[in-house]
Image (cartoon, rainbow, N blue to C red):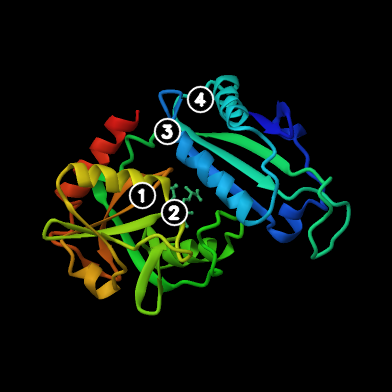
């Protein structure tokens, strides 16, 4: 694989970052994951805008212009001949040359890393046919989940707990209400109403979430942006999650309770199909 590190394209084995990099020592870094279908970036302006916002919330200098970010992504796709997959981009506060809690001086340049992950089943994902089984877990993350930082240990732990429970995913809850999935936004559908938690600092402002809401609105669903409980989700007609890596994926079981007949629902299936048709 050819990867990107601070202005250079090089083989992945040659890409080296300092042990003093703040991304490594302090998870002082933000990231984006953009999907690629037929060699083209999906919803890239949304990801760029969110990258800019994450950086600005943490006072990390945005090291490149929008056009350069786009070139970088396109170049990685071309150099790796990737037709379908993901591009991971990370910007850390950089390498101050020592460990210190305080931010380094402004002349320390951010570290930029990007790489491709080829996948051949983003669009033809078998989980779209089977649906996902999920468990709920207390949300153990920090309170600024709207900033896309690389502090992902609570999400990794939740994924492992889901695995150990023999299911596919975990949904986080806080104060009795669902926040989001480990790496996705979540939705329930009841009697033509599509319900999802409103944007706030409690959840990541998903780029796929926004597209799904627009498509659902165009399809005539009533959108209700409000929080919901696991009980309400278990009584829903359908549920699904959204993310750049999964698009729209149906959820068919929550904490051992099957939704409806336990098969992916028609609205979830339609939204997935429309999303992929429209975006590709
Ligand atoms: N995760 N919520 C969380 C906590 C996420 O990590 C993600 C994405 C989303 C969905 O956002 P978007 O639709 O913009 O991808 C919501 C990426 C895919 C990841 O960490 O791999």
Q: Are marks 4 and 3 in contact (CB under 8 Å)?
A: no
Distance, label 3 to label 2, CA atoms, is 16 Å
- In the picture of the structure, the residue carrying the numbered disc 3 is 42
**Label 1 CB sits under 8 Å from any ligand 1 atom:** yes
N-terminal-most mark, 2 or 4: 4
Residue 209, numbered label:
1
Where does the image place residue 249, in percent across and percent down from the top left? Answer: 31, 48
Residue at x 61% of width, y 60% of height = 151
Residue at x 81% of width, y 49% of height = 106
N-terminal-most mark, 3 or 2: 3
Q: Nearer the viewer, mark 4 or mark 1?
A: 1
- In the picture of the structure, the residue carrying the numbered disc 4 is 82
Q: Are marks 2 and 1 in contact (CB under 8 Å)?
A: yes
Distance, label 2 to label 1, CA atoms, is 7 Å
Where does the image place residue 213, in percent across and percent down from the top left? Answer: 28, 48
Query: What is the quadrant of residue 99 in the picture?
Result: bottom right
Residue at x 84% of width, y 45% of height = 107
Q: Is residue 186 left or right of residue 174?
A: left
Q: Nearer the viewer, mark 4 or mark 3?
A: 3
* Element type at mark 3: loop
N-terminal-most mark, 4 or 3: 3
* Element type at mark 4: loop
**Label 2 CB sits under 8 Å from any ligand 1 atom:** yes
Q: Are marks 4 and 1 in contact (CB under 8 Å)?
A: no
Pick the residue in front: 119 or 223.
223
Residue 58 against residue 123 in the figure, above or below: below
């Amino acid at each position: 694989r050819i990867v990107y590190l601070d202005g250079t394209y090089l083989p992945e084995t040659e890409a080296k970052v300092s042990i003093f990099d703040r991304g490594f020592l302090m998870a002082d870094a933000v990231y984006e994951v953009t999907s690629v279908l037929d060699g083209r970036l999906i919803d890239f302006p949304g990801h760029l805008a969110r990258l800019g916002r994450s950086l600005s919330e943490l006072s990390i200098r945005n090291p490149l212009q929008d056009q350069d970010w786009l070139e970088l992504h396109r170049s990685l796709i071309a150099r790796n001949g990737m037709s379908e997959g993901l591009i991971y981009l990370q910007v850390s506060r950089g390498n101050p040359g020592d460990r210190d809690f305080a931010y380094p001086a402004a002349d320390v340049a951010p570290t930029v890393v990007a790489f491709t992950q080829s996948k051949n089943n983003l669009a033809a994902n078998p989980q779209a046919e089977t649906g996902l089984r999920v468990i709920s877990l207390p949300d153990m993350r920090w309170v600024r989940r709207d900033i896309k930082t690389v502090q992902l240990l609570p999400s990794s732990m939740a994924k492992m707990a889901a695995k150990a429970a023999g299911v596919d995913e975990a949904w986080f809850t806080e104060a009795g209400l669902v926040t989001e999935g480990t790496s996705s936004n979540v939705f329930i559908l009841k009697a033509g109403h599509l319900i999802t938690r409103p944007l706030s600092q409690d959840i990541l402002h998903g780029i796929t979430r926004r597209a799904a809401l627009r498509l659902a609105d165009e399809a005539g669903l009533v959108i209700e942006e409000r929080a919901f409980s696991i009980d309400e989700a278990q009584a829903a007609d359908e549920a699904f999650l959204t993310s750049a890596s999964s698009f729209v994926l149906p959820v068919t079981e929550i904490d051992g309770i099957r939704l409806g007949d336990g098969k992916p629902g028609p609205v979830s299936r339609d939204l997935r199909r429309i999303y992929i048709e429209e975006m590709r």
